[in-house]
Amino acid sequence: MDNIKTKLKLLCFFPLYLLIVSCSTAVVHTPTKITAVTVDQQDLKTLTKDVEVKFDTGYARSLKAGSQWRRIGVVAQGDVYKPYNDVFTVEGAHVHEAYLVVASNMLAGFYLPYEGGFSPLKQNVSITFE
């Protein structure tokens, strides 16, 4: 009897599980090659104002004014900035470490170092460093 109750409970929760799993959107990225910059080109920049970033996955993050970012490389989409003494992540079905990709003072998306890929933003966001 207990075995039947357990199976019924599992059957009741299975549709909810499927709904939760199907709502988890993956962070979309395409493979890209990063070209590292030389040490003398790795300038440290400070973000001048807070920037709110909304991801296509439905999640959002804040880039805080005063946070520091080091230019570490270049991808086809722009310059790649790694957080200085910090970690930045993007989130979808999974959490990914991410670096900023900036072109013409616009945040174009993110470089995902472990995936070796670029994740674009649907709408670029203005970003200002000093």
Image (tube, rainbow, N blue to C red):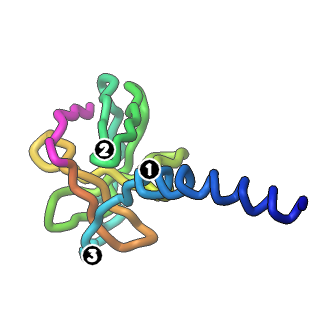
Report the magenta residues as a range: 122-130
Looking at the image, which residue is at 31% across and 67% down? Answer: 38
Name the N-terminal-most of marks 3 and 2.
3
Left or right of 87: which side holds 111?
left
x and y percent of residue 70 in the render?
37, 50
Q: Quadrant of the N terminus?
A: bottom right
Q: Residue furthest front?
A: 1
Q: CA distance from mark 3 to mark 2?
A: 19 Å
Looking at the image, which residue is at 56% across and 55% down? Answer: 17
Q: CA distance from mark 1 to mark 3?
A: 18 Å
Judge by depth and name the residue closer to the eye, 2 or 92: 2
| Residue indicated by mark 2 | 55
| Residue indicated by mark 1 | 91
Q: Helix or strand or loop: what does disc 2 sit on?
A: loop
x and y percent of residue 96 in the render?
46, 58
Q: Residues within 10 Å of mark 3 (few under 14, many from 20)?
A: few
Q: CA distance from mark 1 to mark 2?
A: 8 Å
The mark closer to the camera, 3 or 2, is 2
- Label disc, if present, on residue 31 of the rendered structure: 3
Quarter holding residue 63: top left
Three-letter code for the amino acid on which mark 1 is drawn? Glu
Q: Helix or strand or loop: what does disc 1 sit on?
A: strand
Left or right of 127: which side holds 47?
right
Q: Residues within 10 Å of mark 2 (few under 14, many from 20)?
A: some
Judge by depth and name the residue closer to the eye, 37 or 118: 118
Three-letter code for the amino acid on which mark 3 is drawn? Pro
Three-letter code for the amino acid on which mark 2 is drawn? Phe
Looking at the image, which residue is at 44% across and 50% down? Answer: 91
Q: Quadrant of the C terminus?
A: top left
